Amino acid sequence: MHRAFYGCCNNERESGKVMKDELLKSMLDEIRIIKFLATKIPPGALRYRPSAAQRSMLDLMQYLTVCAIVPSMQAVTGSWEHAEEMEKAADAVNQLNFDRSMDNQAKALKELFNDISSHDFAHKEATMPWGTKCKLGQGLMDMGLKALVAYRMQFFLYVKASGRPDLGPAQCWVGVDPQPKPAKA
């Protein structure tokens, strides 16, 4: 990666650490937003699905609990051996334990990132599910962060369509309720 991209960093080792830390921070923020959106699910909406061929709200929630850690672990280890067990465990996720399950994914991502050196983040080769080779940092972004962003948006749309038309950009993109507008004088 080009040095100018890193701005304040003095050397490649520092810049790799900064990028790794920023990527993890973005992933953890997506998890925070997803947990916030889960508090907006209307009663009785867990069975909601936009069409018969799509996941239900509950199915999507279960997938959200592993959508970043499973491919991120593959990017680091080069193996999908962990995927089946983790996805099977996600089947036990429900509305009551969703928050804790998302916290577990966040914890696992922190541990995974902690074990990645800045050098490996910038230089180690990873393989995308379709066989394309990339650097590990790029693979973590493309498979971990982008999964969280994409499925967070889908989750937002599910929640909104299942009975919360009042939800808007602040809830979706920032994970906060908008501030009320001041009353007109």
Image (tube, helix red, strand yellow):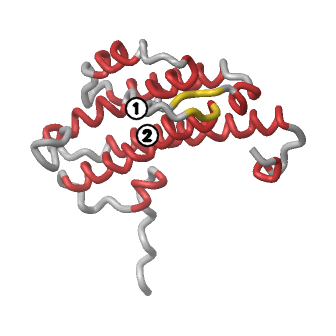
Q: Amino acid at mark 2?
A: Ala
Task: Judge by depth and name the residue closer to the eye, 75 or 56.
Answer: 75
- Dividing the picture into quadrants, the one containing residue 82 is top left
Answer with the quarter of the image where residue 160 lies.
Answer: bottom left
Is the residue marked by circle 2 packed among few (<14), some (14-19), or many (20+) residues within 10 Å?
A: many
Q: Secondary structure at mark 1?
A: loop
Q: Earlier in the sequence, mark 1 or mark 2?
A: 1
Q: Examine the rendered structure and indicate whether residue 21 appears above or below residue 185.
A: above
Residue 58: x and y in percent read: 22, 34
Q: Is residue 135 left or right of residue 47?
A: right
Q: Quadrant of the C terminus?
A: bottom left
Q: Residue at x 68, y 26 (%)?
A: 124
Q: Position of residue 93 (x, y in %)?
A: 28, 24
Q: Dot 1, how many residues are within 10 Å of its Cα: few (below 14), some (14-19), or many (20+)?
A: many
Return the residue nearer the eye: 177 or 68: 68
Asked if the residues shown at circle 1 and circle 2 are in contact, with their CB atoms under 8 angstroms apart, the answer is yes
Q: Which residue is mark 1?
A: 67
